[in-house]
Image (spheres, rainbow, N blue to C red):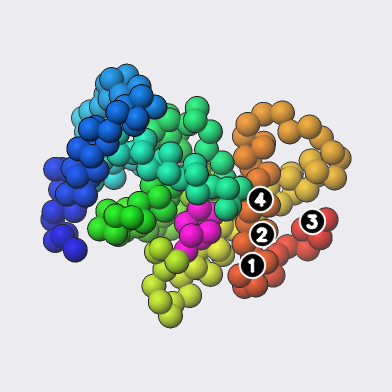
């Protein structure tokens, strides 16, 4: 594995350079992505994050030197994988640009899962995932759907990032359940389904799916008793 300074420098990760060249030479990828527009927009966002005096939740993109081509390729791969865990969905309207601004933690988790064919890059992304989780949840005390969805994605493919013999996956599940309760999804989602309300807005749909995904994982892992008000499921 490359040295620590090589992975987290401002220059592109070696795997990223190889993937970028490979997919830039692939006409099919060029046709599926509007590269000129994505490059300009994403580069503007990344430039702003470099010039900002405050930390952003997507600085790992510049730290690893990820290019728009690589990010969009990995997002496409994650969309194909997501049928195995349908509780977190990414439509093609969710571009790398919009996710870097609004859903950076879910973007990080999705890229880490989708980079399984590139182990060095995946190791670097998983390390960034753990650092971001610690900073946002433990240090800053943040609570939002982005964190919950990112955690669910990471747990669903836990075999990529878990330490053998550790209880890390169960610890992540505890954090996910805490987020469900802190965001009141355990109450609001159950009420919506009990009342058979139509899930009109995108946030409500995604929140309900995340709630069900957390419930599903807790049953599969058989690790932690879920709140009593989940009996409706």
Label 1 sits on a secondary structure element that is helix
Q: In the drawing, does residue 149 fall left or right of residue 114?
A: right
Residue at coordinates 57% horizontally, 53% vertically from top-left?
Answer: 84
Q: Residues within 10 Å of mark 3 (few under 14, many from 20)?
A: few
Label 3 sits on a secondary structure element that is loop
Tell me where the magenta segment starts and ends, as one range.
151-158
Q: Earlier in the sequence, mark 3 or mark 4?
A: 4
Residue 233: name its quadrant: bottom right
Q: Residues within 10 Å of mark 4 (few under 14, many from 20)?
A: many
Q: Earlier in the sequence, mark 2 or mark 3?
A: 2
> Does the rendering let one see residue 165?
yes
For mark 1, what is the residue?
Answer: 220
Q: Residues within 10 Å of mark 2 (few under 14, many from 20)?
A: some
The x and y percentages for residue 42 are 30, 27
Residue at coordinates 19% horizontally, 63% vertically from top-left?
Answer: 1
Q: How many marks?
A: 4
């Amino acid at each position: 594995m490359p040295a620590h300074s090589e992975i987290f420098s401002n220059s592109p990760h070696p795997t990223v350079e190889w993937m970028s060249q490979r997919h830039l030479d692939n006409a099919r990828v060029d046709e599926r992505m509007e590269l000129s527009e994505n490059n300009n927009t994403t580069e503007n966002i990344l430039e702003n994050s470099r010039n900002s005096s405050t930390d952003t939740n997507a600085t790992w993109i510049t730290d690893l030197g990820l290019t728009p081509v690589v990010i969009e390729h990995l997002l496409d791969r994650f969309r194909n994988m997501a049928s195995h865990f349908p509780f977190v969905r990414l439509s093609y309207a969710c571009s790398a640009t919009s996710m870097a601004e609004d859903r950076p933690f879910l973007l990080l988790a999705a890229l880490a899962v989708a980079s399984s064919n590139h182990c060095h890059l995946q190791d670097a992304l998983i390390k960034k995932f753990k650092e971001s989780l610690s900073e946002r949840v433990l240090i800053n005390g943040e609570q939002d759907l982005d964190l919950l969805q990112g955690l669910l994605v990471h747990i669903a493919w836990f075999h990529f990032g878990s330490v053998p013999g550790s209880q890390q996956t169960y610890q992540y599940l505890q954090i996910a359940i805490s987020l469900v309760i802190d965001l009141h999804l355990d109450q609001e989602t159950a009420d919506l389904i009990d009342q058979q309300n139509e899930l009109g807005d995108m946030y409500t749909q995604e929140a309900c799916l995340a709630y069900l995904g957390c419930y599903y994982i807790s049953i599969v892992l058989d690790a932690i008793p879920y709140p009593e008000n989940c009996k409706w499921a």
